[in-house]
Amino acid sequence: MTTVFDQIIAGVREDVAAREAVVSFQDIKAMSRSVPAPRDALAALKVPGCAVIAEIKRATPAKGEIARIDSAASLAQAFEMGGAAMIGCQTERRRFKGSLEDLAAVKKAVQVPVMCKDFIVDPYQIHEARYFGADMVPLLVSALDPSHMASLLDRIQSLGMVALVEVQSPEEASLAVDAGARVIGVNARNLRTMTLNREAFADIAPGLPREVVKIALSGVRTARDLMAYAGAGADAVVIGEELVTASQPASLCRQLVAAGQHPACPSSF
């Protein structure tokens, strides 16, 4: 049975092929090496407490459109003013209504590192992300075989970026570690069933090497949620829907950042 996740991946492959028909792989590869060096995403994450990665997204596969965002750049600036350590920007267009143009606008608008949030299945996307301003790029273990994942991870690092390797089980976490991932994210949202398991991070994170930066994705609505993830070992959390739908995004971001920086917040660094 075809899942929404399968449909997303198929759509991503179609879209990449269409873009590559306009700009060749060799051209996008050269373009990716012509832009300024990436900002230091690892340094932004290796701070005391639990950092906030504020994610810009207009829609989700489960809910459709969730926020009308007239200017991704302005929203990114609001998140930066709120203390976000990094800005994530959705670029998948079919289900999340994102774009690479949003990514470029966000990169120009803020000083903190920027993460391209997409479903990376092809080297072309990595060079694209770098050209449009990405400092960090995600890889989903569930979407890639181990050798392909290792190859994409090497390519990301060769461009000076950081790979956020997303996992949803201890087995996937072991594959990420074996591939040499320095940043591993545990997504509470099962992308095949769209269900939420808030215990996934606590089940997986303790088994990760101490030196790995650990990120929790999905499920953060309040400061209490952030503190719970930090208590389970999270060095950072990705917060999207709650922030983009808030009446005062900068204020909510500031509250969550304050919780992550509070002396009572557990910290790995």
Image (cartoon, rainbow, N blue to C red):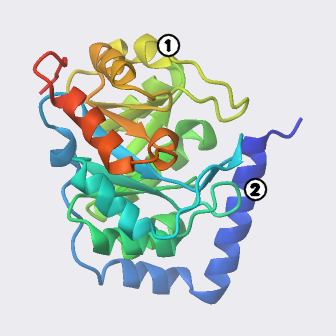
Please give the name of the residue rendered at 67% of the width and 25% of the height, measured from the top-left corner: 195
Disc 2 crowd, CA 10 A, few/some/many (<14, 14-19, 20+)? few
- For label 2, the residue is 10
Residue 174 point in image, percent of width and height: 44, 24
Q: CA distance from mark 1 to mark 2?
A: 29 Å
Disc 1 crowd, CA 10 A, few/some/many (<14, 14-19, 20+)? few
Q: Is residue 119 above or below residue 220?
A: below
Amino acid type of the residue tagged 2 in the rendering: Ala
Quadrant of the image occupied by residue 232: top left
Please give the name of the residue rendered at 50% of the width and 27% of the height, measured from the top-left corner: 219
Residue 223 point in image, percent of width and height: 33, 25
Out of 140 and 106, give the one closest to the viewer.
106
Identify the image quadrant of the N terminus. top right
Tell me the mark number nearer the camera, choosing from 1 and 2.
Answer: 1
Q: Is residue 162 visible?
A: no
Residue 164 point in image, percent of width and height: 39, 44
Please give the name of the residue rendered at 18% of the width and 47% of the height, measured from the top-left corner: 44
Per the image, label 1 sits on a secondary structure element best described as loop
Amino acid type of the residue tagged 1 in the rendering: Glu
Position of residue 113 in the picture relative to residue 175 (left or right)? left
Q: Which mark is residue 199?
A: 1
Marked residue nearer the N-terminal end (1 or 2): 2
